[in-house]
């Protein structure tokens, strides 16, 4: 039987709205799964949703739904998002499904029967928002932070906490915590400390990257405590009841972690035998301890093998701040897809930061990556020879020196790609593949098919076209796991029905022709794109020269530089009156306006203001329009100008004159 590969993502909290962080892990897992499938491995890719817990229960109550009704609705956000992002999972597990609950209850019973669980009274600081207990030090430190007191005199703060002079706070949410005492069930996790250390030492790849492994080893330097695995039903009813004591439900993490096994069916079932242990659990660094210390110990206790690897990647941040719903800085993948298309979003997220490290998102970086890598390099390689798509390929013959050289680059580039993608180094893998994209473009320049055609040198033209079409085939066959749509399209143009990873120039049949097609990616203009992305239309990034230098992800806060009056006078600003406004057919963020700027015909202007204004209320409003901006297409609709708005990256208000001045009035 073929070698098998089992990859998972975390199961996401069903209450949340998916953002680029969730998309990141899932796109990474999808890329890995597609790659392994392509290599002929028996691959399984699991994702899903985490549907129990207090937050879900409260959200449902607020909306007057039962928790089950609530999760049945909210789970659709994830299902739809994965469809938008071309995620090809094999299974989607929901923790409210009977198939999951049965396995979890079986696990609990088994641990109970083996004496791995015991009941005891426990007192501690409980946070209802985080659904967990915290230590004195943790809640005192969070309280100190909330008061914005300098430093943190740990002993003094803990002392004040115990005296009741300081209100303890939850380190996650900042909300006040409560001191509660309750009887609960505990898992004897402390008994597994030595075994965990031995396992990690014997399986150095089991936690990656190395820095994360060291973090876990650091955690394991302190004595491991037993893990509370129950919550009284009186306090939390939305969970899986303990099979041996129905007064309690299971702790959400015990429930959630089990999904990786439960999705395969009961232990011993055919799928379980075929795929467990998982090859890799991809997770964010926030949930590393749960996936290593807790999960490995649980598996030891259950007599199951730990996953072969847990790989923890870093955070996407916004202006160096963690992305979070409460801060209100989350980036909606739908918006990025509406501007760039799905392949480009997948490419950007995987290419931009090394997998494992944190990285800051900015619309400027996304646009730069798009215009340089995808338009200038990749799309160019595919499109420049479209003119000769009708030329039939000659039978492959011995390679002349330039073709042999190109093939050598292809071999090196694809070996680098293969080696790095199998270690989840997406950025390095793509960089490696791009050496071939660049070499292909250079080959077109040097061996100028247009000149060969003009000179009537059909024999050499057919040779050059073979090398180029084979190069395209090799590039898109490898890239198909990252950018499936564009690559499938190019493969079809080459007459193939799927990727072919062979690195050779004699794969395409002699006599075969290609089919012409539109450019895969079209250059996007800075200003309108940045506005559509909710970014500031300032400091236009230009495509860097090839070979590219590293793009810093951070957005430096530049003070505006001085310009002359003449510079300013170049911008023609006019008062416009909005005649009509409607939603853009392909982008949620955009509105399409017809604006009278005092010319014979109204201007059509596409603006990224749909999140702030309902179209109807804009009709009749006077606004300020830049009328001498080169027209640009925004998601397929032409924009003949730009509106002025206040607020920078988040549009706060359109600018409007104090008096009813005529359409076309000059603004200066
Ligand atoms: O933790 N940058 O679910 P969750 C990168 N239900 N990745 C991010 C991110 C960001 N800013 N934000 C989220 C849970 N992620 C549990 C998991 S698993 C048995 C239970 C990704 O909805 C990253 O993979 O909070 C992170 O680990 C995961 O989303 C957390 O998703």
Image: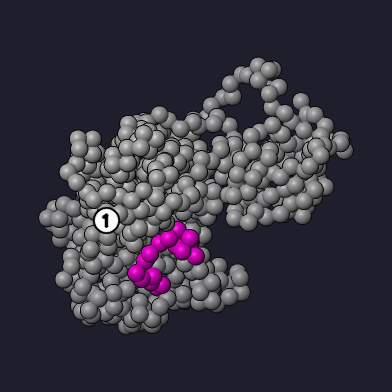
Residue 636: horizontal and vertical position, in percent? Answer: 59, 49
Residue 519: horizontal and vertical position, in percent? Answer: 47, 47
Q: Is residue 6 magenta?
A: no
Q: Assign a secondary structure to mark 1.
A: loop
Between 321 and 465, the one nearer to me in the picture: 465
Q: Is residue 94 magenta?
A: yes
User: Which color scheme is applied?
Assistant: one colour
**Magenta stretch?**
80-95
Quadrant of res 657: top right
Left or right side of 91 for 582: right
The count of marks equals 1
Residue 662: horizontal and vertical position, in percent? Answer: 86, 36
Q: Is residue 223 visible?
A: no
The vertical placement of 20 against 296, above or below, is above
Left or right side of 128 for 421: left
The vertical placement of 371 against 42, above or below, is above
Left or right side of 63 for 443: left
- Residue at the image point whose x is 69% and y is 49% from the top: 592
Between 499 and 3, the one nearer to me in the picture: 499
- Residue at the image point whose x is 22% and y is 69% from the top: 276
Residue 427: horizontal and vertical position, in percent? Answer: 32, 43
Which part of the image, by quadrant, shows the C terminus?
Answer: top right
Which part of the image, by quadrant, shows the N terminus?
Answer: bottom left
Beta carbon of the mark 1 residue lies under 8 A of ligand 1: no
Q: Residues within 10 Å of mark 1 (few under 14, many from 20)?
A: some
Q: Is residue 64 visible?
A: yes
Please name the residue that numbered disc 1 is placed on: 509
Between 504 and 113, the one nearer to me in the picture: 504
- Residue at the image point whose x is 35% and y is 37% from the top: 456
- Residue at the image point whose x is 50% and y is 77% from the top: 68
Between 653 and 371, the one nearer to me in the picture: 371
């Amino acid at each position: 039987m073929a070698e098998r590969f089992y990859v998972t993502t975390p199961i996401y909290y069903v209450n949340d709205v998916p953002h680029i962080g969730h998309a990141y892990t899932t796109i990474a897992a999808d890329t890995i799964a597609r790659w392994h499938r392509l290599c002929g491995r028996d691959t399984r890719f699991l994702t899903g949703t985490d549907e129990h817990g207090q937050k879900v229960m409260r959200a449902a109550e607020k909306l007057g739904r039962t928790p089950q009704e609530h999760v049945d609705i909210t789970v659709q956000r994830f299902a739809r998002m994965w469809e938008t992002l071309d995620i090809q999972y094999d299974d989607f597990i929901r923790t409210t499904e009977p198939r999951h609950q049965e396995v979890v209850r079986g696990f609990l019973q088994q641990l109970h029967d083996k004496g791995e669980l015991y009941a005891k009274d426990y007192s501690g600081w409980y946070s209802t928002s985080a659904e967990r207990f915290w230590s004195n030090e943790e809640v005192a430190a969070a309280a100190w932070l909330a008061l914005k007191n300098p430093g943190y005199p740990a002993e003094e703060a803990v002392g004040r906490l115990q005296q009741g002079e300081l209100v303890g706070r939850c380190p996650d949410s900042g909300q006040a915590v409560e001191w509660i005492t309750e009887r609960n069930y505990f898992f004897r996790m402390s008994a597994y400390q030595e075994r965990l250390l031995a396992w990690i030492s014997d399986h150095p790849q089991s936690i990656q990257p190395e820095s994360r492994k060291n973090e876990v080893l650091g955690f394991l330097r302190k004595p491991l405590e037993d893990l509370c695995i129950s919550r009284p039903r009186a306090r939390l009813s939305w969970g899986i009841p303990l099979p041996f004591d129905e007064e309690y439900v299971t702790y959400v993490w015990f429930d959630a972690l089990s999904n990786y096994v439960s999705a395969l069916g009961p232990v011993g079932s055919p799928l379980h035998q075929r795929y467990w242990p998982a090859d890799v659990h991809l997770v964010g660094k926030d949930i590393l301890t749960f996936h290593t210390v807790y999960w490995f110990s649980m598996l030891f206790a259950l007599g199951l093998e730990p996953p072969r690897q847990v790989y923890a990647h870093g955070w996407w941040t916004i202006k160096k701040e963690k992305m979070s719903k409460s801060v209100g800085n989350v980036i909606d993948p739908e918006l990025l897809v509406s501007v760039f298309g799905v392949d480009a979003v997948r490419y950007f997220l995987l290419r931009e930061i090394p997998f494992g490290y944190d990285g800051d998102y900015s619309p400027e970086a996304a646009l730069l990556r798009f215009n340089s890598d995808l338009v200038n390099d990749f799309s160019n390689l595919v499109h420049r020879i479209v003119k000769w798509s009708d030329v039939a390929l000659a039978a492959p013959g011995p390679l002349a020196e330039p073709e042999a050289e190109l093939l050598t680059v292809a071999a090196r580039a694809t070996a680098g790609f293969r080696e790095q993608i199998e270690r989840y180094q997406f950025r390095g893998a793509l960089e490696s593949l791009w050496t071939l994209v660049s070499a292909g473009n250079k080959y077109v320049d040097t061996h100028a098919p247009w000149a060969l055609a003009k000179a009537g040198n059909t024999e050499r033209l057919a040779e050059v076209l073979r090398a180029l079409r084979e190069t395209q085939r090799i590039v898109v066959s490898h890239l198909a796991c990252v950018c499936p749509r564009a690559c499938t399209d190019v493969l079809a143009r080459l007459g193939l029905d799927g990727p072919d990873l062979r690195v050779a120039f004699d794969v395409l049949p002699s006599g075969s022709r290609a089919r012409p097609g539109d450019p895969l990616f079209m250059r996007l203009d800075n200003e309108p794109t940045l506005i559509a992305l909710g970014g500031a239309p300032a400091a236009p990034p230009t495509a860097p020269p090839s070979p590219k230098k590293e793009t810093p992800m951070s957005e430096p806060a530049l003070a505006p530089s001085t310009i002359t009056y003449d510079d300013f006078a170049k911008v023609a600003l006019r008062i416009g009156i909005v005649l009509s406004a409607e939603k853009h057919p392909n982008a949620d963020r955009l509105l399409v306006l017809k604006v009278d700027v005092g010319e014979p015909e109204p201007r059509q202007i596409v603006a990224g203001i749909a999140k702030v204004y309902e179209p109807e209320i804009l009709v009749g409003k006077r606004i300020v329009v830049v009328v001498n901006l080169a027209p640009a297409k925004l998601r397929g609709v032409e924009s003949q100008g730009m509106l002025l708005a206040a607020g920078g990256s988040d549009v706060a208000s359109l600018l409007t004159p104090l008096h009813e001045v005529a359409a076309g009035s000059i603004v200066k």
